[in-house]
Image (cartoon, helix red, strand yellow):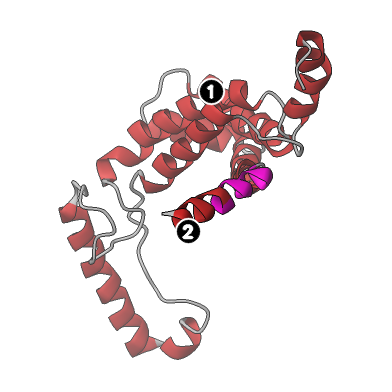
Amino acid sequence: MNFMIKLQKLLEQSRSVDFLAPLLLRIFLAPILIIAGYGKLTALEDTAYYFGEYLGMPAPMLMATLAGATEFFGGIAILIGLATRWFAIPLMFTMIVAAGTAHWENGWHALPETTLTVPWEWRMDKIEGAVERRDKAREILKEHSDYDWITEEGSITVLKNGIEFAATYFLMLLVLFFYGAGRYASVDYWLAEKFCRRKDGQR
């Protein structure tokens, strides 16, 4: 028991660097959001066309502008840790809209996984169809091209485009919403130090 207590105390000491978790989460997620938003904003007409014609969204130009701006500026804010919890809210909403409009009908997995990574895939027919087409594409490429050269940097697959990525980003944003940007390496922390904790007499 004493040994376990010592181990637990040692484990608790790791909390002294707990700021690394939200920092690395922000560094991982922010570029994805920034690039996605930048792509939408620099191709607004194409994005609006896709939103309107393929997704059936109302006011597609407005929706494209809002989605692009939310991802681009929200991504920058999350990267530097500014108003992180506030920006997480519209970004989570954007992920929900993306999952519901662009990805839901394709099920969970982004790729056609024959061995499921999760048990709740609801579009097994999409997986079976994608696997069939992937195998056919590989067959054609092997017959009519240098297949070894084509697959030298990665195998051929088919994008199933389920909600997997949108759901993953939503969960990452949810963590940032509840826990914030973290200590030390965020603008939020230093603003709180200057204007909130000092005012309340807390250190």
Label pair 2/1, CB-CB below 8 angstroms: no
Q: Is residue 11 magenta?
A: yes
Viewer can see residue 148:
yes
Residue 42 percent across, percent down from the top left: 67, 38
Give the residue at mark 1: 90
Pick the front one: 120 or 200: 200
Mark closest to the chain's N terminus, 2 or 1 = 2
Label 1 residue SS: helix
What distance separates the C-alpha of mark 2 from that of mark 1?
A: 47 Å
The amino acid at mark 2 is Phe
Give the residue at mark 2: 3
Residue 152 percent across, percent down from the top left: 50, 84
Q: Is residue 180 above or below residue 159?
A: above
Stretch of the chain drawn in magenta:
10-18
Q: Is residue 113 magenta?
A: no
- Classify the position of the N terminus by image quarter: bottom left
Label 2 residue SS: helix
* Picture quadrant of residue 125: bottom left
Residue at 29% across, 70% down: 134
Residue at 29% across, 47% down: 108
